């Protein structure tokens, strides 16, 4: 029996790809973005990887997402991936 993949894992990885792409397009270092957003560099690096702890999907605070979007000159719509299907408990 195979467990269905967790849609949040892919959502978090795609968020990380979007952060990495936006940062690279602007020629910014991870350290610069982290500092400008008030985050530890380690924390920002984990967000770009889409994880918080090994094997655990990233789950940043709303404030963190808003600040990162501002630092990277993006709207939240541009930063956030499309809503994953089937994330509501009991569905």
Image (cartoon, rainbow, N blue to C red):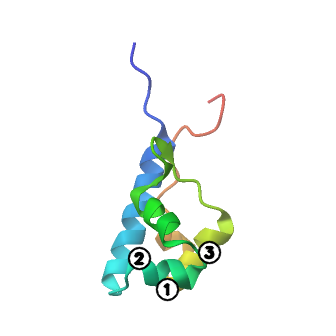
- The tag earlier along the polypeptide, 1 or 3, is 3
SS at mark 3 in the image: helix
Residue drawn at the location 49% of the way across and 86% of the way down: 73
Q: CA distance from mark 1 to mark 3?
A: 10 Å
Number of the front mark, 2 or 1: 2
Residue occupied by mark 2: 30
Q: Quarter of the image holding residue 87?
A: top right
Whether residues under marks 1 and 3 lie with C-beta atoms below 8 angstroms apart, the answer is: no
Of the 4 image quadrants, the one containing the C terminus is top right
Residue drawn at the location 66% of the way across and 33% of the way down: 89
Residue toward you, 71 or 91: 71
SS at mark 1 in the image: loop
Residue occupied by mark 3: 66
The 10 Å Cα crowd at callout 3, few under 14, some 14 to 19, many 20 or more, is some
Determine if residue 75 is in view: no
Residue 2 is marked as: none
SS at mark 2 in the image: helix
Q: CA distance from mark 2 to mark 1?
A: 15 Å
Residue drawn at the location 37% of the way across and 85% of the way down: 28
Q: CA distance from mark 3 to mark 2?
A: 17 Å
Q: Is residue 18 left or right of residue 79?
A: left
The 10 Å Cα crowd at callout 1, few under 14, some 14 to 19, many 20 or more, is some
Residue occupied by mark 1: 73
Q: Position of residue 80 (x, y in %)?
A: 50, 64
Q: Position of residue 37 (x, y in %)?
A: 57, 80
């Amino acid at each position: 029996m195979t467990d269905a993949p967790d849609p949040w894992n892919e959502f978090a990885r795609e968020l990380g790809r979007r952060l990495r792409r936006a940062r690279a397009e602007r020629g910014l270092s991870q350290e610069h973005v982290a500092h400008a957003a008030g985050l530890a560099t380690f924390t920002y690096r984990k967000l770009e990887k889409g994880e918080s702890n090994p094997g655990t999907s990233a789950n940043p605070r709303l404030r963190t997402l808003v600040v990162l979007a501002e630092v990277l000159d993006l709207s939240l719509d541009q930063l956030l991936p499309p809503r994953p299907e089937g994330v509501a408990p009991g569905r």
